[in-house]
């Protein structure tokens, strides 16, 4: 079993839809949770960062962590064609050299 | 501000040939540095990380090696490439903002095709 599981998709939605991207993890020692966005043939860019259970909002993006169920979510409101990318969730454990464990990534396509 | 460079951007190499990929970081000192490989449609696999000059930790046994000859330079090498070495190679540095531990920032990547 991978430590971080993510449905690879692809996921296709119409413009303006609400998108829900999800990951599950198995290691209860994970403390930090991140979402990265990766456009085709580019390096990933940090999108959202959360430390504890709860929600964090940044514009159209909301990151949610539920440590009791080991579930990580990213919601995108009013999705735009420019949101079309692969979204990677990542987790880490405190004081482990900053190593991140990534999910497989979900490919999202937002159709105009 | 910090920037990270990787070169070359793309590379096509025959099986059995050597490899050298370079990563440099600007605007920060003594960063933790990481090499990842991303196969098509897959997530990121951590290959090596370094906490300082000459200090390399290998995460996965493989045909590759890494070196850190200078504080902001990280090199990925191979003596003889295999077909299975094809992929997208990414270098990253660890952010030093204590408010956001363990964040990593990625370079543009090198796409390697081994034929």
Image (tube, coloured by chain):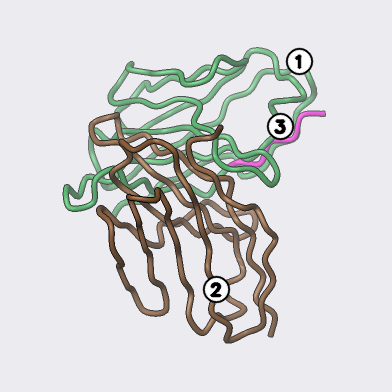
Circle 1 packing at 10 Å, graded few (<14), some (14-19), many (20+), is some
Q: Is residue B48 left or right of residue B89?
A: left
Please tell me which residue lies in front, B85 or A54: A54
Residue at left offset 55%, top offset 57%: A38
Give the foreground label among 2 and 1. 2
Q: Mark 2 points at which residue?
A: A19
Q: The C terminus of chain A is located in which quarter?
A: bottom right
> In what element is the residue under mark 1?
loop
Residue at left offset 67%, top offset 82%: A14
Identify the image quadrant of residue A108: bottom right
Q: In this view, does B65 lie to the left or right of A10?
A: left
Marks 2 and 3, how far apart at CA: 32 Å
Which label belongs to residue B16?
A: 1
Mark 2 and mark 1 residues within 8 Å of each other at the beta carbon: no
Chain to which the residue tagged by mark 2 belongs: A
Q: Give the vertical position of B5 relative to A55 (above or below).
A: above
Q: Give the vertical position of A24 relative to B64 (above or below).
A: below
Marks 1 and 3, how far apart at CA: 12 Å
> In what element is the residue under mark 3?
loop
Chain to which the residue tagged by mark 1 belongs: B
Which label belongs to residue A57?
A: none
> In what element is the residue under mark 2?
strand
Marks 2 and 1, how far apart at CA: 45 Å
Give the foreground label among 1 and 3. 3
Chain identifier matching the green colour in the rendered picture: B
Residues in magenta, as a range = B110-115
Chain identifier matching the brown colour in the rendered picture: A
- Majority secondary structure of magenta residues: strand
Q: How many labels does the image show?
A: 3
Q: Name the residue under label 3.
A: B86
Please tell me which residue lies in front, B25 or A38: A38
Locate residue B106, reporting x and y percent. Answer: 44, 47
């Amino acid at each position: 079993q991978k430590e971080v599981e993510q449905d690879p998709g692809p996921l296709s939605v119409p413009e303006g839809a609400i998108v829900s991207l999800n990951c599950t993890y198995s290691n209860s020692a994970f403390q930090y949770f991140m979402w990265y966005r990766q456009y085709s043939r580019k390096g990933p860019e940090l999108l959202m960062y959360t430390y504890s259970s709860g929600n964090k909002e940044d514009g159209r993006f909301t990151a949610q962590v539920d440590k009791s169920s080991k579930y990580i979510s990213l919601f995108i409101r009013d999705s735009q064609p420019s949101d079309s990318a692969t979204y990677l969730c990542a987790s880490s454990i405190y004081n482990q050299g900053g190593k991140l464990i990534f999910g497989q990534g979900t490919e999202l396509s937002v159709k105009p | 501000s910090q920037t990270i460079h990787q070169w070359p951007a793309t590379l096509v190499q025959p099986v059995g040939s050597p490899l050298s990929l370079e990563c440099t970081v600007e605007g920060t000192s003594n960063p933790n540095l990481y090499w990842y490989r991303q196969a098509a449609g897959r997530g990121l696999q951590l290959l090596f990380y370094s906490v300082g000059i000459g200090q390399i930790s290998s995460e996965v046994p493989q045909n590759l090696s890494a070196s850190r000859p200078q504080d902001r330079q990280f090199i990925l090498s191979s003596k003889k490439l295999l077909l299975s070495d094809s992929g997208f190679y990414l270098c990253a540095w660890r952010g030093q903002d204590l408010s956001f531990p363990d964040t990593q920032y990625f370079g543009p990547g090198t796409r390697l095709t081994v034929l």
